[in-house]
Image (cartoon, rainbow, N blue to C red):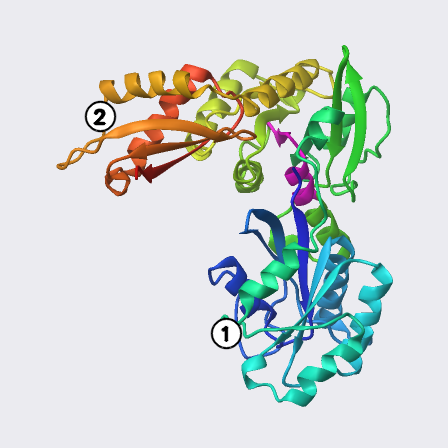
Amino acid sequence: MARSIVAIVGLQNVGKSMLFNRIVGSRVAVVSDEPGVTRDRNLRQVEWTGHEFLLVDTGGWMPENADGIDALVLDQTRVAVDEADVILFLVDAQLGAGEVELSLARIIKRRNKPCLLVGNKSDRAPEGPAAGLQSLGLGEPVLVSAIHGTSIGQMLDDLVALLPKQLDDEAASEGVRVAVIGRPNVGKSSLVNQLLGTYRNVVDAEPGTTRDAIDTPITVKGQPYVLVDTAGLRRRGRISSRVEFYSHLRSVHSIEKCDVALVLMDANHGVTQQDIRIAGLAHEAGRGSILVFNKMDLVQARRPLEKRLAEELERVMAFNPYAPVHFISVKEKHGTKALLPAARKVDGARRTRIQTADLNRTLQKIVEYHPPPGRRPTRIFYGTQIADCPPSFVVFASRPENIQRNYIRYLMNQLRKEYGFEGTPIKLSLRRRR
């Protein structure tokens, strides 16, 4: 299920990064009293009362006649407003609403999107300016203090009430959603075109041709799929223009929407740091992954290279050893036909449900063979699967705090050995039995 995007927008120095950090729960954005510190976007996953969304911290809104780097920040903030499902409009309650706030409010209203008006620094705000926030025409403001955490819970309750409703079975009804992700110019559009059997998407040797994420339904041997061709993901330091940032945000959202990600890489370049980061986005989002090396037609000695790349993956992508690896050549149409059936198999693994009795028989064998280490014995009583997509388990124990991370990895590896779970991450947490 796709997570909605919530963008925090407002003028410089109203406390956007402070509020972002307060919501996320860690200092991931630079906070300073100097206006204009946030030059790039921060994007983090947030969960509140069972509702998940992606929170975007933006640079400060400023007058329309801004130039230089200020104009670039303004442009990227517009992108966040355009792409967001819900807008959190932050205003300094001490200062109230001025002309620049009114201009931003007019833009938000023209977008016709849900918006939550929030007055920050309310602990130091006189009544007059705070009451004047209603003049923005965006409803009753929620008054908070980001630095002290005052009324943040109420604000988040109001925020999740504005999130669009989404159906859990949306993807299942339309087919397996397969996102082709990767760095620019690794052959994503060419691969999608070949899978579609038509030149639907523009293909160009110039990196970054695909600027949007395009969803295309397709049926292969009676099986439905939805292909998503995403814009190339660059390092954030290189996301310098409105178009680049828009592409980056849409690509991240495409990963959130998909069931399985085909992580496309250039076999001639090996595994780059950006490849690792992109694969990590799919892993962290709980999506299935297939690692695909393209441009094998340019390789002189194919078998030695395949072996070297497999060893490199084992070393630098230890977080997703479950992902199957495919070597293809889009140009020569070699190996591409196997990708969609492989994606369907991975999607099936993501949706696996294991009966509790079966799971506990397996856990008993695993624990008997290798009990949890430690001076004080820790008993593992039973486990149960609490979710799928990805498969998620909870195991109840007498002293869960004594169980080390490497033993948790051992349990997960043994569950994989028993049930497969090819191509999908799995989650396992420990709880104390009451």
Q: Which residue is mark 1?
A: 147
The residue lying furthest to the left in this view is: 375
Q: Quadrant of the C terminus?
A: top left
Would you say 361 lies left or right of 256 here?
left
262 falls in the magenta region = yes
Question: Measuring 77% from the left and 70% from the top, which residue is drawn there?
Answer: 138
Q: How many discs mark residues in the rendered view?
A: 2
Of the numbered discs in the image, which one, if any, rests on residue 70?
Answer: none
Would you say 208 lies left or right of 403 here?
right
* Looking at the image, residue 31 lies above or below residue 412: below
Would you say 119 lies left or right of 417 here?
right
* Percent of width and height locating residue 289: 57, 28
270 falls in the magenta region = no
Frontmost residue, 63 versus 160? 160
- Residue 1 occupies which quadrant of the picture? top right
Compare marks 2 and 1 and give the one earlier in the sequence.
Answer: 1
* Percent of width and height locating residue 431: 34, 39
The kind of residue on which mark 1 rests is Ile
Q: Which residue is mark 2?
A: 371
**Mark 1 crowdedness (10 Å alpha carbons): few <14, some 14-19, many ≥20:** some
- Residue 373 occupies which quadrant of the picture? top left
SS type, badge 2? loop
SS type, badge 1? loop
